[in-house]
Image: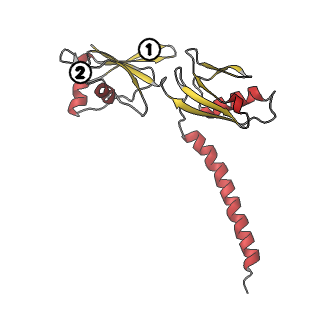
Amino acid sequence: MFDWGGDMNRVTFGVVSLLLFLTGVTGVHAADMVDAYRLRSGDAALISVWREDALNKEVRVLPDGSITFALVGRVEVAGLSTPEVEQRIAAGLKKYFPDPIVTVVITGIEGNRTYVLGKVLKPGPVVMSAPLTVLQALSIAGGLDKFADENTIKIIRPQANGQDVLPVNYKDLISGRDMKTNFQLKAGDTIVVP
């Protein structure tokens, strides 16, 4: 006779153990694989501290890359993901609360901008709410005007040690012959259309 009670307990224990193991494994790998959004100057975030409603506050990342939060003061957040910001704020609150649980939710991505400058119909900043390519940004800018020089379009990309200039072959992009210069844009890029 098969003992369902004992076998079910072993099966349940095995399933639970397997799920806990997989959760731990995938948690590590998921963190490595996911390219988390990193805060930039101009972004907004809602910061909540569990059971401390008086501390809940929406903040904007300042041009110097910091925010100010009650009891913690100035916190450098530019370039950090939301879990990293949560850890920094929680560390600052530990002297006031035993185990603060901090949640950071991004409410505005105004710092995630690229710029289109020159002979386009609508020059100016473009907030990137999704991945954006050169052709997509030029489309948002209304396209090239009739006096634009298609042969000298370039992207100016800020780097830690200066700026890179990436040439864009607009004729190849429009014809579909060669899409190599339809670059994925990054925050801070400027497309220049002479």
Query: Seen from this angle, which residue lies furthest front?
Result: 54
Mark 1 lies on residue: 163
Q: Amino acid at mark 1?
A: Gln
Residue 180's label in the rendered image is: none
Labels 2 and 1: the sequence-earlier one: 2
Considering only vertical position in the picture, is 111 above or below 6?
above
Residue 194 locus on image (x, y percent): 27, 13
Residue 69 locus on image (x, y percent): 68, 22
User: Which corner quadrant of the image does residue 2 belong to?
Assistant: bottom right
Residue at position x 35%, y 30% in the image: 133
Q: Residue beneath label 2, please?
A: 144
Give percent across and percent down for residue 188: 44, 20
Closer to viewer: mark 2 or mark 1? 2
Looking at numbered disc 2 in the image, what kind of residue is underneath it? Leu
**What is the C-alpha distance between the residues marked 2 and 1?**
24 Å
How many numbered badges does the structure rendering display?
2
Query: Is 121 displayed left or right of 60 in the figure?
Result: left
174 vs 163, left or right, is left
In this rendered view, identify the residue nearer to me: 105 or 7: 105
Vertically, is 87 above or below 121? Answer: below
Query: Looking at the image, which residue is at 32% across and 30% down?
Result: 136
Does dot 2 land on a helix, a strand or a loop?
Answer: loop
In the rendered view, does 43 fall on the left or right side of 152? Answer: right
Q: Residue at x 75, y 25 (%)?
A: 92
Image quadrant holding the N terminus, namely bottom right
Q: Residue at x 23, y 34 (%)?
A: 176
Label 1 environment density (alpha carbons within 10 Å; few <14, some 14–19, many ≥20): few
**Closer to the camera in the image, 136 or 51:** 51
Q: Quadrant of residue 97?
A: top right
Callout 2 crowding tier (Cα within 10 Å): few <14, some 14–19, many ≥20:
some
Q: For numbered disc 1, what is the local secondary structure? A: strand
Q: Measured from the top left, where is residue 123 in percent x and y?
A: 32, 17
